[in-house]
Image (spheres, rainbow, N blue to C red):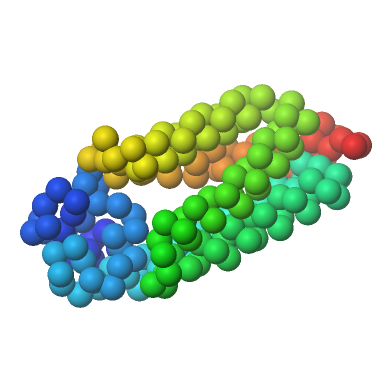
Amino acid sequence: MAAQLYPGGSQVDRDAVGFSWVNNYWCNLLNENAINGQPNPAKPVAITGMFVLCLTLLSFWFLFTKYITRSKKLKLTIRISGTISMMIACFLFTNFNHDLITNLASLFGLIATVGTFIGLYKVRWYSLLAFGLLNILLVALNNYVYYSRGLIIFLPVIQKISFVAFLFWLCCIDLKLYATERKPHKREVITFTP
């Protein structure tokens, strides 16, 4: 919805009309003004979407740890780092340094994600673990392209692929948890003693 409201402008063409799925970044939707200089009516919708996303990820890390581990240390690590990551991500709505906010949120998100990997490994959900590792490679590719600047023209597409892949991974984990939870006799499969 925010993309539909975005007035225009991208890294390729400042005068382009509308949001380009190939040339615009998600963060363009959060700016006060569009790249073409016009006021950005997409901002409130984009902020609402990001807020819902942050709450959803926060909920995921709390619920995931409830079902996947009995280890208090692992639960706390995932929950605290996930919470900090989402709280920091909310500063993307402000005028704070975008790169600093993104890097800090990513660092704490990485800690929560590594904790998620540990949980997936311990319950032997290896295919979901492998899919998660693919997501880490996509994040690394994002960072490489962003900081090397050599292929920056492709970053908006890489960013969207990474975003969709990460959300799909979380959905797959949720579906696996749901399927396991619906079979009470299977519950023992996803718990372990440290």
Q: Is residue 15 above or below residue 41?
A: above
Q: Which x, y percent locates residue 189?
A: 82, 31
Q: Residue furthest right?
A: 193
Between 16 and 102, the residue placed more toward the observer is 102
Residue at 43 percent of width and 44 percent of height: 163
Q: Which x, y percent locates residue 137?
A: 49, 31
Disc count in the image? Answer: 0
Q: Is residue 64 above or below residue 158?
A: below
Can residue 158 be seen from the camera position used here? no
Left or right, 160 with reference to 117: left
Query: In the picture, residue 114 is in which quadrant?
Result: top right
Q: Residue furthest front?
A: 148
Q: Which x, y percent locates residue 193?
A: 91, 37
Left or right, 36 with reference to 25: left
Q: Is residue 109 above or below residue 191?
A: below
Query: In the picture, residue 194 is in which quadrant?
Result: top right
Between 183 and 123, the residue placed more toward the observer is 123
Q: Quadrant of the N terminus?
A: bottom left
Q: Which x, y percent locates residue 55?
A: 57, 63
Can residue 94 be seen from the camera position used here? yes
Residue at 59 percent of width and 45 percent of height: 110
Residue at 43 percent of width and 69 percent of height: 96
